Image (tube, rainbow, N blue to C red):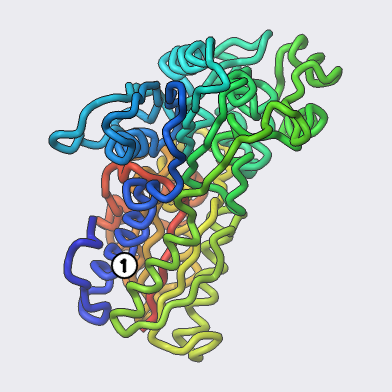
Amino acid sequence: MNASQVLPDPRTAPRDFLRYLYGVAVERALPLASMGPHLPEPPKGRTLVLGAGKAGGSMAQALEALWPADAPLSGLVVTRYDHIPPRPEGLAKRIEIVEAAHPVPDAAGLKAAERILALTQGLTADDLVLCLISGGGSALLTLPAEGLTLADKQRINKQLLESGAHIGEMNCVRKHLSRIKGGRLAAACGPAKVVTLTISDVPGDDPAVIASGPTVPDASTCADALAILDRYGIEVPAPVRAGLENGALETPKPEDPVFKGHEVHLIATPQQSLEAAAAAARASGIEAHVLSDEMEGESREVGKVHGALARAVALRGAPFAKPCVILSGGETTVTIRPRQPGQAKGRGGRAGEFCLGLAGALAGQAKVWALAADTDGIDGVEDNAGAFVTPDTLARAEAAGRKLADHLDRNDAYGYFDAIGDLCVTGPTHTNVNDFRALLVL
């Protein structure tokens, strides 16, 4: 990552400087640096490792490196395709890592979830279950409730993603339509002790929301899930709807004794990564301001608000003095617009759509540069992490025949920024603390 390089001068290399800050944020969220203090002592019995998420591969390798070499360790973790990091030389393989699809689940994820649930059979009170949970686990740990097929889950998941529903709403539905999420995995591990190590990718860092909380109690209800499905017009099979209506698909609640003695540890959070980036900016002589790690809303609208703030700083030196870096995180949403007849399908994710809104609001404002990127290295389902916005973004795009309004109309941030060479491509980072946004005002 860029964080291992010399700190670029923000005044002469603003893009490199923003990319460096992104690298610092990602490096802070890598599990090897933060997992150790949260590990329990090896148990009297065996230690079983179960996990799911985009950071699953790196979390498993970190655990293999940190767990005592003479203490038994085995298990299964599922991560996204192409998200297993290269194995460090000499590191013994003790945990199986498999890959599956994200954000729409596939048969490989279903098989992995079935295997993970099967591994909980026969556990005793002398055993320890270490659960490695990170963002993306909802799609990767797919085990449909009775009455649902994988095809049903894929359709519902896709409709939720395109509806504009926020992450809490999506995960409420996912929990109630699953046999493994919403605390059910922890319930299956009894009577063994469960220690969950998690990397947060959600506003508020609620473990019950991260990856739909497979190992923690769920305070939401079947009625909540049904209301969300109705709100967004998403159909479910009649038996499943009946199960939501009569409470048959209810999840384990906070008062359930099955969770007694269990532990949950947040080993990396969005705020920690933003603070690391802020410290790096200050080390270069640029003041940094962290707005929030919990920003939600339509990506393009959040981009417009950031643009208005940056323009105020650039033109009036308020509310922050120049030069400065403005940082924010969270999880915005993209509502897919209906395509007009003959209109090309758009490509892109939250970070790119934020940049479209930001570029329009900045309107070519001098001395403002920005980077928005997902900390997992993948914006939506594309090969870029996000995109850059520069003072001449609109002018270069216009020269390339790209109209901002057209790309917004069809949610095509990828095509817009690709045409002017402003995609930020990092490849998988092997962690995930969600959106990273940095605006540099000189």
**Residue 202 at what x, y percent from top left?**
56, 48
Where residue 25 appears, as percent x and y from the top left, is 37, 60
Between residue 341 and residue 285, name the one nearer to us. 285
From the top left corner, tell me how far across and down residue 154 is, in percent. 54, 21
Tell me the residue that label 1 is attached to.
Answer: 18
**Is 223 on the left-hand or right-hand side of 374?**
right
Residue furthest out toward the left? 89
Q: Secondary structure at mark 1?
A: helix
Q: Is residue 328 above or below residue 134?
A: below
In this view, the residue in front, 276 or 234, is 276
> Eyeballing the image, is 85 above or below 143?
below
Q: Tell me what residue is drawn at x 36 percent, y 46 percent.
A: 31
Residue closest to the eye, 92 or 229: 92
- 3 relative position to 298: left or right: left
The residue located at (75%, 31%) in the rendering is 253
Q: Residue 430 lies in what quarter of the image?
A: top left
Name of the residue lying farthest toward the front = 44
How many residues crowd around disc 1 within 10 Å: few (fewer than 14), some, or many (20 or more)?
A: many
